[in-house]
Each structure stands twice: as C-alpha cells, then as structure tokens.
Amino acid sequence: MANRKASVSIVEPNEPTTEYRKVLDELVRRITSGELAPGEKLPSTVRLAAEFDVSVSTIHRVTTTLEDRGLIRGVPGKGRYVRS
C-alpha cells in the first residue's frame, strides 16, 4: 500500500479571499470605467453585500482598500463617494 500524504491548503490569515478579490476587482472596474462616476455615492454596505452575495465584513474590507487606494472617500454619516 502506497503512503499518501493528505493535501492541505493553508490560507494565511491576511490573504484576501476569492470573494473579496472578485468584489474589489469589479468595483475598481466600475470606478475606472466611469460606470461609477466621480462624486457618485456608492451603494450602501448592505446593498453591496446583497448584490455580490458576500458578507458585510467582506464589503468593509473592500471599501477600506478602495479608500486606501484613493478611489473612494468616506463622509461620516453620509456614505462613501467616488473620488473626483
């Protein structure tokens, strides 16, 4: 009998998930293509989570990344907007 090792996938804790990457790539595409115009308000976190069928925490991670990249800006109490 052959000795086989079990294949185990190890995911680093900070490694982006496939869902995160998919949502991030799509929102970047919408912003850079002008589909989401400068100054336009992004849909709410809950609405984006429902649209992409992901958790609210995934959307929070995505919007934080978009803010860090300078593509959107948050306005306290108002929402997030595409940067002009």
Image (cartoon, rainbow, N blue to C red):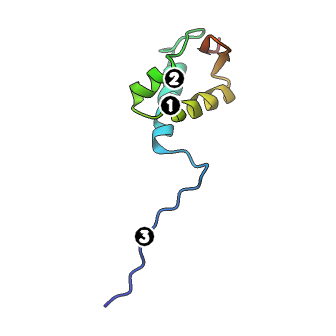
Label 2 to label 3: alpha-carbon separation: 36 Å
Task: State the mark number for residue 66.
Answer: none
* Nearest the eye: 34 or 81: 81
- Per the image, the residue denoted by label 3 is 7
- Per the image, the residue denoted by label 1 is 56
- Residue at (47% x, 62% y) in the render: 9
**Left or right: where 84 falls relative to 20:** right
Q: Earlier in the sequence, mark 2 or mark 3?
A: 3
Q: Earlier in the sequence, mark 3 or mark 1?
A: 3
Is the C-beta separation of discs 2 and 3 under 8 Å?
A: no
**Whole-percent x and y of residue 13?**
59, 52
Q: Residues within 10 Å of mark 2 (few under 14, many from 20)?
A: some
- Residue at (63% x, 22% y) in the render: 71
Q: Please name the amino acid that badge 1 sits on.
A: Val
In front: label 3 or label 1: 1
**Left or right: where 9 falls relative to 39:** left
Q: Which of the 4 image quadrants contains residue 66?
A: top right
Task: State the mark number for residue 45.
Answer: 2
Is the C-beta separation of discs 2 and 1 under 8 Å?
A: yes
Q: Tag 2's secondary structure? A: helix
**Whole-percent x and y of residue 27?**
50, 25
Label 2 to label 1: alpha-carbon separation: 6 Å
**Left or right: where 59 falls relative to 47:** right
For residue 77, say whether it is visible: yes
> Which image quarter is the C terminus in?
top right
- Residue at (52% x, 61% y) in the render: 10
